[in-house]
Each structure stands twice: as structure tokens, then as C-alpha cells.
Image: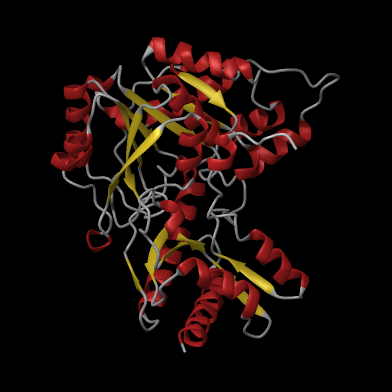
């Protein structure tokens, strides 16, 4: 039998999706599964996006431009301009989802064996993107007790070697919901300039910040014109995860040219998804106000509910729509699988994402899960009851 590549063998499974077979088996047994494991919003997609696809007529469904249509990129640039961020259409390459944007960014700034510093826990697929590009992630662990605030810059500097090429952050953070303070980003900016590093900022949750917090973009730092790379997406902002449209933004012309070569190799992003995404850019402020209010209420409801379950601890996320919860178990992955295989309350169970897969350091996050508050409050309430009863049964 032909040999599978070492790269494929070492490619990590997604902690978000690896338990899906157990969830599907539970559904086949007639059990309703409350999905708290994945960031798939139940918020309605803007109607104009769906309408634009329905009304699009083609005699030939042709390739689009590799970097995305000029009209769409101009709208994206206008979106950034409204945030007082200096971006032009020429600074943008449209990608097939934020995932492709991240992969193109890594492939453009790091050679095999070079190092990427990433605060952990982090979006689990960063491990996969790094492995696919033969890049080494150097984790710097954030502390649960500080709500996963950025570690000290001195700790970052100790990790920098001759192989370090970039720092990758997610702001607001998936999976912790942490929103970086301006001073934290300012310190990172100075560090990048001092050591001539790129900063890749995954900002796909930019719109979702709570309690009066402010999101600061790495694009706001003019001194990082050659160093800042921002990854963005329509998936969460417009509840269009299935569209798979993202974009990478950089004012570094040489870097943009490199990214464009990766994009040319896959030809172009999907045309219908581009049509929907361009229409979604016209979504009015009232839509976002309502969405933000809804997520804020869900966050409060979930955090309060988790705090009432004996032995469970959680942070209070300021952004995105996730939180990390510590459970009174030794192995959260085993517990998550047990919930799907062996536990149901009135024919219902819960699916969560084991948090160990959101770390690069072996052994971290063993008693933690990531919970996505993308369900309505009635479903969250039911899920919390099931989780509490499940923990009682499991720990006894």
C-alpha cells in the first residue's frame, strides 16, 4: 500500500469537529444534540445577500478575478475607511474564507522550519495551517485567572530566535473572547518593529465587543505599514459561514504580490459567494446593533448559568461569542465524548469542544472546554441544565 505523507500523518484533527461522528450516532438514536461546540451563528443572514444570489443571472458561470472583484474590494476598503483605517482596494486580496487568508499569510512570510509566536489558547486550526506550511508554532500561554490577557512583552521577547518571523494574534479571541487593550497592541507593535517581525492579526470578530469595550485594529498603527497583516471574513459578521469568503489586508506591496501568487494557484474565489458578500457589505447599522445586543445577552446568560454549576469556572469574555470553562473533570475530551455516547436528559444532550485542542503546549487545557453561545437563550438554558446533570452523573 502506498505511504501517506508525514505531513498528513502529523496534521491535527479539529477539536471542534473530531467528535462529530459521535454526535451523528447520537442523532441516529433519536437524541437531540445542542451544539455548543462550533461557531455557527443562528442569526439570520442579511436578506439582501440572499436576494442578490437569487436574482443573479448568468449564461456562463465564469471565473472571477483572482483577488476578488474591484467592486467588492472597493466596498471592503470603504468599510475600513468608516472605521478610520487607511486601506485601499489595492491592499486587499479576497480569499476562500478567512482560513485561506491565514494559510496564504503564513505561506508568504514563513519558510519551512521558521517560527510563529502565538498566544494560547488559540483558534485550533492555527495548528493545522502551521503544519500544512511546515511552520513551527511557538506558544506563549495566557492565564485563565487573568481572563487570558496578553502575557508580558518580556515573555514574548524571550521566545524570539533567529527563526522567528511573525507573531499571530486573534482579536477578539477565539476561543477565549479576550479583547486586546490598546496598550497591549502598542507594545506588540514596538516589539515587531524592534525585531523586524510581521504581526498577523485575525480580526474576524471585530464587530462583536461588549461592555463598552473598543476594538483596536493592527491597521491603526501607521508605523506597521510594512509589518501588519490583517485577516478578515464575512462568515461571522454577516452570519454567512457557508459563503467561505474572507480577505487578507496588507499595505506591504511586496507581501501583497506574494499572497496574490498563492491566490492565483487556486484561480479565484467562488462567484456566487462574492455576489452575496458584496451585497452584505450594504447591511445597515441597525442589523449590527440588534446582533450585538443579542450576543451580549446570551453571553451574560451563559456566564451566569455556568457560574451556578458546582465545580465549573469560567471567564467573562469581552468579545466574539465563545468562552472557556473549567470543568470538575480530569479529561474534558473524554467527558465530551461520554455526553454524546452515554448521556441524555429527556432525549437531549450537549456537544462542547474540548479546549486541549486550542493549545499547542501538550497537557494544557485538559479540564477545559470551549463553549459557543450561538444558540438562543431558551436553547442555552436547556443546554446548561443538561450539562449540569451530565457532570453530576459523570463525576459520581
Q: Quadrant of residue 20?
A: bottom right
Residue sitting at 76 percent across and 75 percent down? Answer: 29
The single residue placed furthest to the bottom in the displayed view is: 396
> Left or right of 200: which side holds 48?
right
Q: Quadrant of residue 200?
A: top left
Q: Residue at x 39, y 23 (%)?
A: 110
Is 154 situated left or right of 96 in this image?
left
Picture coordinates of residue 177, whole percent (x, y): 37, 54
Instruction: Tell me residue 366's x, y (percent).
Output: 40, 64
| Front residue of 117 and 85 | 117
Residue at image location 55% in from the left, 24% down from the top: 94
As displayed, is residue 88 above or below residue 115? Answer: above
In depth, the one of 135 and 9 nearer the eye is 9
Q: Residue at x 21, y 29 (%)?
A: 189
- Residue 104 in view: yes
Residue extending farthest left: 154
Indicate whether 268 appears above or below 370.
Answer: above
- Vertical arrangement, residue 257 with respect to residue 103, above or below: above
Looking at the rendered image, the quarter that the N terminus falls into is top right
As drawn, 336 above or below 133: below
Amino acid at each position: 500500500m502506498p505511504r501517506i505523507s508525514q505531513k498528513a500523518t502529523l496534521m491535527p484533527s479539529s477539536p471542534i469537529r473530531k467528535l462529530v461522528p459521535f454526535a451523528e450516532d447520537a442523532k441516529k438514536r433519536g437524541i437531540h444534540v445542542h451544539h455548543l461546540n462550533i461557531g455557527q451563528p443562528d442569526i439570520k443572514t442579511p436578506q439582501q445577500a440572499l436576494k442578490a444570489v437569487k436574482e443573479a443571472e448568468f449564461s456562463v458561470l465564469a471565473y472571477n478575478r483572482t483577488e476578488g472583484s474591484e467592486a467588492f474590494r472597493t466596498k471592503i476598503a470603504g468599510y475600513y475607511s468608516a472605521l478610520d483605517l487607511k486601506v485601499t482596494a489595492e491592499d486587499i486580496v479576497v480569499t476562500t474564507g478567512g482560513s485561506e487568508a491565514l494559510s496564504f499569510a503564513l505561506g508568504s512570510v514563513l519558510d519551512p522550519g521558521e517560527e510563529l509566536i502565538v498566544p494560547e489558547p488559540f483558534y485550533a486550526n492555527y495548528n493545522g495551517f502551521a503544519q500544512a506550511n511546515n511552520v513551527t508554532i511557538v506558544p506563549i500561554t495566557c492565564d485563565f485567572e487573568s481572563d487570558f490577557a496578553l502575557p508580558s512583552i518580556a515573555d514574548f521577547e524571550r521566545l524570539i530566535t533567529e527563526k522567528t518571523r511573525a507573531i499571530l494574534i486573534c482579536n477578539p479571541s477565539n476561543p477565549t473572547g479576550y479583547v486586546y487593550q490598546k496598550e497591549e497592541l502598542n507594545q506588540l507593535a514596538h516589539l515587531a518593529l524592534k525585531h523586524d517581525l510581521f504581526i498577523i492579526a485575525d480580526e474576524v470578530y471585530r464587530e462583536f465587543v461588549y461592555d463598552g469595550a473598543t476594538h483596536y485594529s493592527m491597521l491603526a498603527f501607521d508605523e506597521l505599514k510594512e509589518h501588519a497583516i490583517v485577516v478578515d471574513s464575512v462568515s461571522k459578521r454577516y452570519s454567512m459561514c457557508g459563503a467561505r469568503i474572507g480577505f487578507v489586508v496588507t499595505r506591504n506591496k511586496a507581501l501583497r504580490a506574494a499572497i496574490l501568487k498563492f491566490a492565483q494557484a487556486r484561480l479565484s474565489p467562488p462567484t456566487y459567494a462574492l455576489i452575496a458578500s458584496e451585497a452584505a457589505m450594504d447591511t445597515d447599522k441597525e442589523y449590527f446593533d440588534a446582533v450585538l445586543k443579542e450576543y451580549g445577552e446570551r453571553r451574560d446568560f451563559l456566564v451566569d448559568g455556568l457560574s451556578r454549576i458546582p465545580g465549573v469556572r469560567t471567564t467573562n469574555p469581552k468579545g466574539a461569542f465563545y468562552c472557556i470553562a473549567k470543568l470538575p473533570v480530569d479529561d474534558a475530551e473524554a467527558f465530551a465524548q461520554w455526553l454524546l455516547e452515554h448521556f441524555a436528559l429527556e432525549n437531549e444532550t450537549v456537544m462542547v469542544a474540548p479546549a486541549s485542542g486550542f493549545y499547542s503546549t501538550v497537557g494544557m487545557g485538559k479540564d477545559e472546554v470551549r463553549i459557543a453561545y450561538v444558540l438562543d437563550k431558551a436553547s442555552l438554558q436547556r443546554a446548561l441544565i443538561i450539562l449540569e446533570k451530565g457532570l453530576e452523573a459523570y463525576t459520581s
